[in-house]
Image (spheres, rainbow, N blue to C red):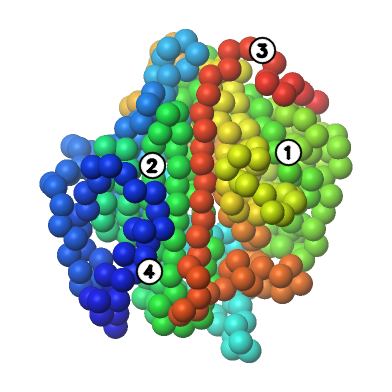
Amino acid sequence: MRTAALASALWATYALARPQVAGEFFTGTVGNTTIAGDNHGPDANGKYVIYGENIRANFIPYGASISNLFLNDTSGVERDIVGGFDNASYYGVDKQHPHFGGVPGRYANRIKNSSFVIDGETYNILGNENITPEHPNGLDTLHGGPGGWDWRNWTLVAHTHNSITFSLTDPDGDQGFPGEVVSYVTYTLGNMTWDLRMVAIATTKVTPIMLSSHTYWNLDGFANNETATALNHSLWMPYAGQRIDTDNILIPTGDILANQPGSVNDFWSSPKQLGANFSNPAIVGNCGYNCTGYDTAYVNNRQAPYDWRNEGPVARLRSAWSGIQLDVYTDQDAFQVYSCGGQNGSVTLKGTQGLHGVEDRPRFIEQYGCVVLEVEDYIDGINQPEWGRDKKQIFGPGDDPFVLQASYKFSLNDTEVGLLGEGSG
């Protein structure tokens, strides 16, 4: 069991590694260590609010999740542009569990056969996806298993006007993973920016760690009177000339494929709408068996060394209707795009969404009504040694911690053509 001294040391290490904010106060408990601070509680819906310049957001301890993100569009109308629920209490009871805005862990995305090998020892973890009669628990593990990190209540350990930090201690053996892991996630708002930093520390055994942020985006706030989907959003990923090949249940085959210019997976040669190629027969099965759309891990091919904060975004998402543009900067080497093909109209919009002119439209997220952009490392890299991802995905006591950083920079663009040109074919 971790001692109070170790808990304090871990927190101190993390706190020194993250940006300090004037006026910051701490609250909550990490291990056996109580961190006291001001009583800055949640609102009536169980949400904690932080503010930036021309932006504000709500977060909840469940999954360390973002639940609302507000900013004005080019018409000056405030939009809530992320998926979620109105009340924090519903995240834990919703049976679909769409991973709304949370931190999947201890290993994000998919693990083939729900197993991996470290130092010659095979570990079998809990499965939870692609359930069959022969495999009632599933053929693989998605987002850390049936009780992964975004199914759990995290501890609030720091909260300021513009920043919030959550912590989670994942015990040895949970979901079948070896060793204890202590993690901290900090979200900070700036001038039309949302920054996140995730740190995870293996304290007792060597174990795989790969985290991400699983936020559902609709830059129209589900209020576009022309379409209920996000297929009108344009996407540009200038470094994504390759993708990780997967089988029909989205498990990597080990191959890395080129995204040929003009192909359905080409978002690097120029921006194009998410729905631009939906009439192309090649899009069928692109996201798995009998699936149309995207659930695809792209590779960020940036020449090292690179300054991830300043050398350009790995992705640009934009809606011409709202004029809201999102540029994603990250230190991670892969980028998953999910076009919400699994949404079926069973998730209700929040009260803050779908307003101003579309009140007669059914109030739910339709198929393709959103897009998930996941900053992360190569999916299932622990089962693909030829990719050389061990230093990015396997950690033990005394190693440097796992660190993920990302910056989401918002801007308003009221032109009909995107800043870099916007294709439609």
Q: Is residue 184 left or right of residue 314?
A: left
The residue under the point 17% across, 44% down is: 41
Check disc 4 and report the residue beneath it. 182
How far, Cα to Cα, is label 4 from label 3?
47 Å
How far, Cα to Cα, is label 1 from label 2?
26 Å
The residue under the point 35% across, 35% down is: 57
Q: Nearer the viewer, residue 63 or 403?
A: 403
**Do the numbered discs 1 and 3 sit on residues whose CB atoms are within 8 Å?**
no
Q: Is residue 281 left or right of residue 246?
A: right
Check disc 1 and report the residue beneath it. 238
Q: Is residue 161 visible?
A: yes
Q: Earlier in the sequence, mark 1 or mark 2?
A: 2
What is the number of the mark on residue 416?
Answer: 3
Q: Position of residue 392 (x, y in %)?
A: 60, 66
How far, Cα to Cα, is label 4 from label 2?
20 Å
How far, Cα to Cα, is label 1 from label 3?
21 Å
What is the number of the mark on residue 188?
Answer: 2
Helix, strand or loop at label 4? It is strand
Q: Earlier in the sequence, mark 1 or mark 3?
A: 1
Image height of 302 relative to 229, above or below: below
Q: Amino acid at mark 1?
A: Pro
Mark 2 crowd level (few <14, some 14–19, many ≥20, 10 Å Cα): many
Foreground mark, 4 or 3, reads: 4
Quadrant in which residue 174 is drawn? bottom left
Q: Nearer the viewer, residue 173 or 368?
A: 173
Can you say which quadrant of the picture contains the C terminus?
top right
How far, Cα to Cα, is label 4 from label 1?
34 Å
Q: Amino acid at mark 3?
A: Glu
Marks counted in the figure total: 4
